[in-house]
């Protein structure tokens, strides 16, 4: 029986802020004490007197003294997170949930699909895989965004693309007037036509807005991926983080403690999973 | 063991005054304004307190899992309190909450604190509310295990049973302070007779709702039936607030300075914003989705999560409902 307070908060200082897009920023945080997590797990980030929300770190889990968290402005708490300045103090509690099962990924061709701010958790996975890249056959990252302006981690793509065994393909849904883009213009699911991976027993990790997750999950079996190999980040309203508050319940599962990463096989018979 | 009712009452008053190291004695008191019913209150002054009767208006859950509590930083302190007149349904609800809130994944520190520091004296039901239906959920109008002491009211006496080491401790204190008599076969047989009468009253009261327990069918029921059943629901969340086994909460940050203070407050799955995620999507946008969720949570999800049904049949949700929705009728209609 755990005797520690599950709500215990570790204060952290914001030491850098990267504006990734008009609505997405990355906070670089130094927690007062190191936070160990497994990539794919999430934390609750608090803004004092405002509230907290669940976010999956976007840095490698091998780094515990610092933590990057990429956040889209989309609600009450995140609007305040977008007003935070360097030097401000925030609170972190966690980590919670189960991470990506790296042991099942090792020795495989790993495919990652990240749409919009869904690139944030998958960046943590990607960077963690890079730390031990000799363990994997290949890493393919399909990145999608609505427009070029919405594409995040722009500053890192060049370096990541040059790494041996890494294939990075980016696509945007459309290119508005005044923006330039010389990579793919299509929905992220169409990027699957650009790759050549044997789907047998190879994992695919999907994270993005519900509509993208839904269509990716419908398309992947057509390319030969098995339900057991499709890993979905089912981010819900994970309020407490450990199976108490029930807000994130998907039928008998809790997104917070049984997930947030589920295989499609586990949850395909539950109701309203895409909403 | 048997003690005189008035002497037992005096004993509890002495406990409120500090006997046995107790800091507080809480028990049901009859409502003095119009209407029937009891609510839990501190034993203070000369009021119409009830040790038997039927289940209180407020669920006992609220004395272990307060509607609003600071969860971090932890508040220190010791406390010893005596809780009297708890009914079998509420005790069963606490046993369900024990599984939900003290388990291998996490322990809610406040719930655990109140659970450890409370001595629970239950009592047999000597009356029923019209909404009582514990018998439909496998319950009885008297507790069988999980209490510290249990009381059965027999005329001007109480028959006392011990159910735990804490109960043994209480019994010792009682013996040191109150004249007591050994159980007699006559007393035992009148207890059994009263209990049997209460079971029969419950069965009669709920005869029209009795159904085979095929709760797994609930998930398959067509959505039209749920729309029909929920048409009088206004989505106020009263049913979840008063339910002895509901424990959904939200967590708030309430200070601008460090240390970070977290306060948890009750929430309700019947409210529209409950499962809404950033961006505005919610898995249960319609009232009937949320209405159905409450029933499935009790009869399906909690069964999967904890191996027990999430309903104890106290009937409070029927009693509190402004839309006059009869819980037993809904359960019957979605199982047919």
Image (cartoon, rainbow, N blue to C red):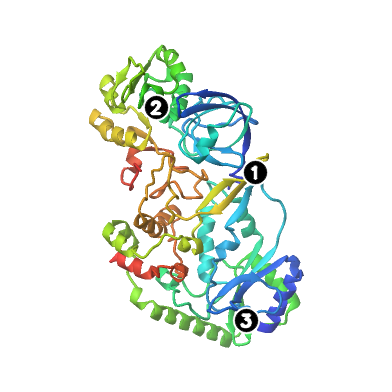
Q: Is label 2 on the same chain as label 3?
A: no
User: What kind of element bears circle 1?
Assistant: loop
Q: Residues within 10 Å of mark 3 (few under 14, many from 20)?
A: many
Say whether residue B103 is left or right of residue B82.
left
Q: Quadrant of residue B225?
A: bottom left
In the figure, B113 relative to B254: above or below?
A: below
Say whether residue A18 is left or right of residue B297.
right
> Which residue in the structure is indicated by mark 3?
B158
In the figure, B120 relative to B36: above or below?
A: above
Does residue B215 appear in the picture of this structure?
Answer: yes
Picture coordinates of residue A193 (x, y %)?
25, 22
Q: Residues within 10 Å of mark 1 (few under 14, many from 20)?
A: some
Picture coordinates of residue A104 (x, y %)?
40, 29
Q: Residues within 10 Å of mark 2 (few under 14, many from 20)?
A: many
Q: Residue shown at 64%/55% (left/top)?
A: B113
Q: Is label 1 on the same chain as label 3?
A: yes
Q: Nearer the viewer, residue A201 or B128?
A: B128
> Which residue in the structure is indicated by mark 1?
B255
> Which residue in the structure is indicated by mark 2?
A105
Q: Residue shown at 53%/61% (left/top)?
A: B95
Farthest front residue in view:
A178
Q: CA distance from mark 2 to mark 3?
A: 66 Å
Q: In which quadrant will I find the C terminus of chain B?
A: bottom left
Q: Chain of mark 2?
A: A
Q: CA distance from mark 1 to mark 3?
A: 50 Å
Does residue B122 appear in the picture of this structure?
Answer: no
User: What kind of element bears circle 3?
Assistant: strand
């Amino acid at each position: 029986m755990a005797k520690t307070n599950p709500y215990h908060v570790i204060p952290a200082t914001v030491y850098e802020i990267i504006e990734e897009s008009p609505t997405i920023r990355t906070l670089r945080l130094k927690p007062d004490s190191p936070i160990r997590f497994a990539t794919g797990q999430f934390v609750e980030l608090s803004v004092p007197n405002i509230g907290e929300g669940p976010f999956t770190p976007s840095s490698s889990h091998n780094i515990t003294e610092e933590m990057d968290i990429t956040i889209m402005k989309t609600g009450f708490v995140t609007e305040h997170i977008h007003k935070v300045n360097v030097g401000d103090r925030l609170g972190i509690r966690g980590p919670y949930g189960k991470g990506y099962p790296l042991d099942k990924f090792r020795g495989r061709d790993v495919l990652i699909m990240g749409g919009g701010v869904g690139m944030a958790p998958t960046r943590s996975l990607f960077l963690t895989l890079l730390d031990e890249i000799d363990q994997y056959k290949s890493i393919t990252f399909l990145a999608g965004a609505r427009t070029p302006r919405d594409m995040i981690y722009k500053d890192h793509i060049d370096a990541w693309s040059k790494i041996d065994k890494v294939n990075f393909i980016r696509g945007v849904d459309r290119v508005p007037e005044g923006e330039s883009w010389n990579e793919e213009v299509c929905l992220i699911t169409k990027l699957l036509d650009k790759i050549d991976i044997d789907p047998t027993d190879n994992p695919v990790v999907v994270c993005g807005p519900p509509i993208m997750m839904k269509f990716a999950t419908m398309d992947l079996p057509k390319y030969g991926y098995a339900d057991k190999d499709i890993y979905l980040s089912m981010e819900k309203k994970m309020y407490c983080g450990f199976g108490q508050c029930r807000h994130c319940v998907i039928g008998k599962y809790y997104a917070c403690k049984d997930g947030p990463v589920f295989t499609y096989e586990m949850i395909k018979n539950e109701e309203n999973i895409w909403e | 063991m048997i003690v005189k009712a008035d002497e037992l009452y005096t004993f509890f008053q002495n406990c409120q005054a500090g006997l046995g190291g107790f800091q507080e004695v809480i028990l049901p008191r009859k409502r003095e304004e119009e209407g029937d019913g009891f609510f839990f209150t501190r034993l203070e002054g000369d009021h119409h307190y009830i040790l038997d009767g039927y289940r209180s208006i407020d669920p006992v859950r609220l004395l272990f899992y307060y509607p609003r509590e600071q969860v971090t930083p932890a508040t220190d302190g010791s406390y010893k309190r005596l809780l009297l007149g708890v009914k079998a349904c509420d005790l069963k609800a606490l046993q369900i909450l024990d599984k939900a809130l003290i388990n291998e994944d996490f322990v809610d520190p406040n719930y655990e604190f109140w659970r450890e520091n409370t001595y629970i004296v239950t009592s047999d039901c000597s009356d029923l509310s019209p909404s009582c239906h514990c018998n439909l959920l496998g319950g009885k109008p008297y507790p069988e295990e999980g209490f510290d002491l249990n009381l059965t009211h027999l005329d001007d006496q109480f028959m006392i049973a011990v159910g735990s080491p804490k109960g043994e401790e209480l019994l010792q204190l009682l013996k040191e302070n109150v004249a007591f008599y050994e159980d007699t076969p006559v007393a035992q047989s009148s207890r059994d007779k009263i209990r049997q009468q209460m079971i029969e009253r419950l069965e009669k009261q709920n005869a029209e709702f009795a159904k085979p327990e095929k709760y797994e069918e609930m998930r398959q029921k067509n959505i039209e039936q749920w729309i029909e059943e929920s048409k009088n629901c206004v989505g106020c969340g009263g049913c979840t607030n008063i339910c002895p086994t509901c424990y959904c909460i939200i967590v708030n940050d309430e200070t601008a300075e460090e240390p970070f203070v977290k306060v948890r407050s009750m929430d309700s799955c019947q409210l529209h914003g409950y499962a809404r995620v950033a961006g505005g999507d919610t898995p249960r946008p319609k009232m009937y989705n949320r209405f159905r969720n409450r029933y499935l949570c009790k009869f399906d999800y909690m069964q999967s999560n904890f191996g027990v049904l999430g309903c104890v049949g106290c009937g409070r949700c029927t009693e509190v409902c402004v839309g006059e929705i009869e819980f037993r009728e809904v359960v019957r209609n979605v199982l047919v």
